Image: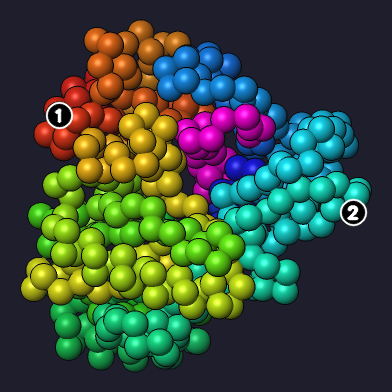
Amino acid sequence: MANIAEIARPLTQLMMGASREHEIFEDHAFCDRFMFAQNDERILVTPLPIEAAFWEDTTARIGMKNWINLSPKVIQESVCQAVAEDEGLMRKLTEAIRESPDIEILAYSATDEFVELVKKLKHRGLVFRTPEMPIEGSEWTTNFFGSKSGFRQTVNSLRLADMPEGMVCHNTTEVLGLARYILDKHGGVVLKTNRGLAGAGLKIIKRADLKEKNLNDVINEILASEPFWTKELIAVEALVEADLTVAGGNPNVELKIEGDKVERLYFCGMRVTKQGEFRGVEIGEGTAPKEMQEILFKWGAEWGEYLKMTGYRGFFDMDCILGKDKRIWPLESNTRRTGGTHLYELGVRLFGKNFAQTHFVAGNNVTEAPKFYNKKYSDLKVAIEDLLYPMNGKKEGVLVTVTNYLVEGKLGYGVVGPNKTRVEEIEKKFLGKLA
């Protein structure tokens, strides 16, 4: 179940019209990338149908076997609700589950809507497994530990690691007061709405950028820009100036809890803009020193053991920032698959589970492609054919990951190769063809 938009729902429901509609569409378009999950024998339910030419070409390039793409007839915010209300689609899924009683039902995130859909399917007497869903009675863990306040409270309670100085605020007075204190002390302050994601609901204020502006006026303008700023908790914390030379300044680890096991998956450097917007990841040798990777995996394993104890199951990550003083600070956790999971799974599919030791994978979920505004994959393919995986029969090249966004002149992609230098070389040529 490609249900990205459901994790943004607490945020989008508190957005104004135009920004709300765009966020929902973007999240639906991003669901193309679930094609790159490593397992075969799969039904992929996406909010928007994946373009047939893109699906067929990618299937051939990466050796997908026995995949089916289904979509509900009517889609709004929630793919799981749309599925439940589409009797024809429910009938197809019911038949598939009955034919495969050991089938697994997975989702990007175990949202409330996904949990309700699972209940509806079980009510039909169907037998299936949900290994990436919290155990019964612990469904609350997904939302709580994936929030800014839930993560900050728990990390501090567990004494897992120091976080940037800050607190969770309940009203404008608290935000204004704490922001002034932190700005005066640290020279920069970050405001984060409790359930923001990928840069939405995040603002960075630097003392040097204020110039003649009054801090209260700047913050009040931010708080008035979208309803979620005044209807959600807000984390106010010190800005850490990132050392961009290592892991993009934003190291991350992703792990998975299945049954009683907390499993390491991968370390990556996150691609984050100056405004704090997440774009993609880089996985492989040369991303960061082994010592840093082990520190983050240690934190991730400890965090995972606590999540497991509370009943959480499934994917989770830990986002961190590397300061210019080389100190690492944990920032938040996403209790779900992430914007990098599909590239990790692509790497596993193409090169094996330990691919990060022998190959390099990088990519962005969204990048500007103005030359292909409102075009089809077939138009794009002609222009980039010489760079597409497998280039010249070798295990390297570009794989487009999102095409439903071409309607706005944007796309997602991944680049794979033997090392970081080669991937950067291919990526530069690819991006040059999009402008």
Callout 2 crowding tier (Cα within 10 Å): few <14, some 14–19, many ≥20: few
Name the residue at 63% across, 32% down: 42
Q: Are marks 1 and 2 in contact (CB under 8 Å)?
A: no
In reply to whether residue 196 is colored magenta, the answer given is no
Callout 1 secondary element? helix
Of the pair 288 and 386, the residue shown nearer to us: 288
Identify the residue position indicated by label 2 in the image: 123
Instruction: Check disc 1 and give the amino acid type.
Output: Arg
Image quarter (top left, top right, bottom left or bottom right) of the C terminus: top left
Q: Is residue 322 above or below residue 63?
A: below
Q: Nearer the viewer, residue 153 or 5?
A: 153
Numbered mark located on residue 399 in the image: none
Name the one closer to the observer, 249 or 188. 249
Q: Earlier in the sequence, mark 1 or mark 2?
A: 2
Q: Please tell me whether the stretch drawn in magenta is mainly helix, strand or loop.
A: helix
Query: Where residue 413 appears, x then y in whole percent?
Result: 36, 31
> Range of the magenta residues?
22-44
- Which quadrant would the N terminus be assigned to in this image? top right
Check disc 1 and report the residue beneath it.
Answer: 422
Cα distance, mark 1 to mark 2?
Answer: 52 Å
